[in-house]
Image: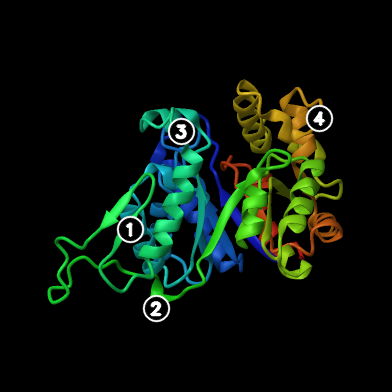
Amino acid sequence: MDKGLFSIPVYNQNVSMDKVIDEIVNQVIEADKWGVNEAFFGEHITDKHEKITSSLLMVSTLSKLTKKIKLGTLTTNLNFHNPAIVASMISMADNLSRGRLMLGIGSGANMSDIESIGNAEKNNHDITLETEKIIQELIVSKKLVDIKGKYYKVSTKKFGNEDLGLGFFNGLYKDRNNLEIVMPALNENSYNVKLCAKNEWSIVISNFCSEEIIENHISNYLENSNLPEEQAYKKIKLSKLIFANKKKDGGEELVFSNNSPFMEVVSTLFKKLKKFNKHGCFGKNIESPLEAAKSTVMYGNPDQISKKINSKYKKLSSIVYVTVPLTGNDNFDRSLEIFSKNVSV
């Protein structure tokens, strides 16, 4: 089992964008040194709490500041882009990172994002799937292209010129053909889970999910996958809010306190999801941020967290640590380091 980290991120609305980006960049650089295997970045374009607007830009930025850690988008919303544009960006990000890109795809979780680009009345899911298919064709194409879909046409036949090298798309790093496609899994009986299982794509189970929903996602992936069970498990990643500390009692009083960044994150997410009646992922009959946090946050000293992970999830591909804002309090701010260095999976 690998270790990963996921920077959504969820900050107070008044925190400046440059501070958010600096914290995330520094966390990933350190995680790379500590041996964390993969890092994912969220993406929202109209959200004051979640200020990363391009996960591909985060991948590109960190590609030259890190050495080994894989860098993933979670998600690049394919319905937001013309396939030719996003294919070229994917190619560049993968070459910048020397083949470390993992491509998380989606259709946009925030309706305000979808509204802002004029897609509120469109079938965004279908657009995403068509865009993904066209991108796959473009990044392996060696000739001029002429692709016609329901929503997009991508052609270079009219003005392309082989002698001049015009009309040709760049591929992945060293023309690799093993780009990992990833989708998030949130609510019970998620369509994304079944789609990924059938396509042999990976899933990242959301850190919003209760144990019951996590089990639902895992069983649905295994049920719908044609892969041998051991290989299917290796397509499943689990993201969690994890408070790793060295206190004997596991830090229970701290993690649920008023000044806890974990409570700040959960409270913000709970309010958003409840507004749109999507808070069922936190568990049945969860009606407050504290209940949501107790349902989803994993906490403890390294031994306690290791036992929790290995007793339930050791067959999965990775356990993905969800970052929280820095506080100036070492009890919270060293959590990622303790997870990276001292938790055994």
Viewer-side label of 1, 2: 1
Circle nearer the N terminus (1, 4): 1
Regarding residue 76, the answer to whether it shows in the image is no
Residue that appears at 80% across and 57% down: 309
- Marks 3,4: beta carbons within 8 A: no
SS category of the residue bearing label 2: helix
Q: Nearer the viewer, residue 252 or 103?
A: 103
- Mark 1 and mark 2: span between their CA atoms? 24 Å
Viewer-side label of 1, 4: 1
Q: Position of residue 296 (x, y in %)?
A: 75, 40
Q: Position of residue 342 (x, y in %)?
A: 73, 63
Mark 3 crowdedness (10 Å alpha carbons): few <14, some 14-19, many ≥20: few
- Residue 270's label in the rendered image is none
Viewer-side label of 3, 4: 4
Report the amino acid beneath label 2: Lys
SS category of the residue bearing label 1: strand
Residue named by callout 1 = 147
Mark 2 crowdedness (10 Å alpha carbons): few <14, some 14-19, many ≥20: few
Q: Position of residue 290 (x, y in %)?
A: 75, 28
Report the amino acid beneath label 1: Ile
- Residue 174's label in the rendered image is 2
Residue that appears at 41% across and 54% down: 56
Q: How is the image coloured?
A: rainbow
Circle nearer the N terminus (3, 2): 3
Q: Nearer the viewer, residue 110 or 22?
A: 110
- Marks 3,2: beta carbons within 8 A: no
Mark 4 crowdedness (10 Å alpha carbons): few <14, some 14-19, many ≥20: few
- 112 with respect to 233 (left or right): left
Q: Nearer the viewer, residue 314 or 182?
A: 182
SS category of the residue bearing label 3: loop
- Which quarter shows the N terminus? bottom right
Residue named by callout 3 = 15
